[in-house]
Amino acid sequence: MKKVLLTLCGFCSIILSSCTASMFGQYKVVETFDEIKKLTDDNEYIKLGCDIDCNYETLSNIKCARFDGDGYSLKNIVSTSKENYSLFSDNTEKIENLIIDNSTFKIENGLNDIAIISKRLDKKGVEINNVTIKNSKLDCSFTKNTSYQMYDMKVGGFIAGCDISGYYVTESEKTSSNVNNCTLDNVKFDITVEKSRSGDVYVGGLVGYGMETAVSQCKVVNSEFIVNGKTESNDIYIGGIAGKNTKIEDSFVKNTSISGINTTYSGSFGILSTPEIVVGGIAGDNNKLMSFCYSQDLTLTANSSGDAYSGGICGICRNGISQSYSRGNEIFIKGYVSNNSHVKRRTGGFVSSGVNATITSCFSYDNTILDQSTNNLKYSEDSLSGGFVGKNSNCSISKCASNSPSIAGGIVDSFVCENAGTLSENFIDDIRFGNVSNAETITSDFWTNSNEIKEKLHLLGGKWFYSLDDLPHLEF
């Protein structure tokens, strides 16, 4: 009898142990590719027990509540998918301590949300911490689809989009998403938008469209983003961190190429028509705050025969940027067609166009700024190229500085090309390209005089580092 009771107790103990793990969030350890493929419970907490080689097989929509990579990697994933895609399901609320290595994600006939890690979570937020994607490629094409024809297209390395503004939710239901301490290293995005597909396109190295998303302590390095539009109706927004509307701090993009292309030049009754392309080193078009960020050694290209914006930090800034800089970037606009009039073509060493924003304690240094349409413009005022900002529309810009050895456009200026805002306590070291803003002229020694630059630009906090022979720089 005692033996039977002991056996029953042992059996009950196993059941209770399993229930307790589920109820109290204990992690189930997985160590093989097959174990990951078989995950079906959206409530489970999963932890990797070792590196897993996926052997060039497809992996997607991993079902779990939380996933802890514990510092291990998933490598050699080759996923071919149609419509939408992400590695984890929409119900996964937290992903951390994971490496994605040497993997390819190919999506054909994309609908609206594409991400390597997580798609859009409408009412639900997702937290992504200490995740690295490296040596990988995302290849995606968006084509005409009857059901999703009018939807925007959002692509991100970590999150496609988190915009809940279009859904009926109470304030208490709103949940933000966070991407912290994440890295994109040697990753290529190749995005194609086919003809006749409506909706705008938002592409970011980390986040596509991030209305309810915050990014902190992240980096994008040694990567390439190409968005090729083949339509007359899609505006394209691309940023090294985010395509549009994401709060960003303590983050940078370095040694990376970002290019948006849409050179359609036709329309009804011979009207010349192309959509807007907005490219930014950190963000494309942003109405969220940005601080302690930098872009360095980038190639940024907005290639369009219509409206085009290309800026070292941000294409279009609609909120605020502080304590940030753009350095050593090549900032281009291409694709203009002769006699296409009244188009908006803006380039800026820091921001190409500022709208109702506040920019303070920032600088742009050693950027090449070039609108290649200079020789063909019907109206020179269509092209504005500024060492710091191309066009200022009701922005407040203060305690900022610019150094631009090369600027070309219809109208150029060493600081702000066209100003309809408030400027105060700004500085330039070269007036060859003009100084309509009356910025204070400084010598080249200013940039390496740590006391002077710190005081004049009001650089704050322990994130700034100084040396005798170089500019101030941020370290996180």
Image: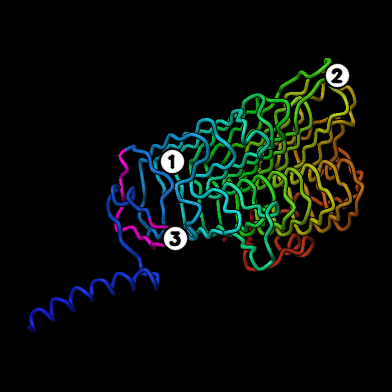
State the image quarter where residue 406 is shown: top right
Q: Residue at x 47, y 57 (%)?
A: 92
Label ID, residue 473: none
Which amino acid type is marked by label 1? Asn
Q: Residue at x 51, y 52 (%)?
A: 90
First in sequence: mark 1 vs mark 2: 1
Q: Residue at x 39, y 73 (%)?
A: 24
Q: CA distance from mark 2 to mark 3?
A: 56 Å
**On the image, numbered disc 1 is attached to which residue?**
135
Badge 2 crowding class, 10 Å Cα cut-off, few under 14, some 14 to 19, many 20 or more, is few
| Residue nearer the viewer, 133 or 200 | 200
**On the image, numbered disc 2 is attached to which residue?**
339
Which amino acid type is marked by label 2? Asn
Q: Is residue 289 magenta?
A: no
Badge 3 crowding class, 10 Å Cα cut-off, few under 14, some 14 to 19, many 20 or more, is many
| Residue nearer the viewer, 440 or 206 | 206
Image position, residue 111 (x, y; %) = 57, 36
Q: Quadrant of the C terminus?
A: bottom right
State if disc 2 and disc 1 touch (CB < 8 Å): no
Badge 1 crowding class, 10 Å Cα cut-off, few under 14, some 14 to 19, many 20 or more, is some
Disc 3 element: loop
Image position, residue 300 (x, y; %) = 66, 36
Disc 1 element: strand
First in sequence: mark 3 vs mark 1: 3
Disc 2 element: loop
Q: CA distance from mark 3 to mark 1?
A: 27 Å
- State which mark lies toward you, 2 or 3: 3
**On the image, numbered disc 3 is attached to which residue?**
65
Q: Which residues are magenta?
A: 41-55
Image position, residue 312 (x, y; %) = 70, 43
Image position, residue 68 (x, y; %) = 40, 60
Does residue 302 show up? Answer: yes
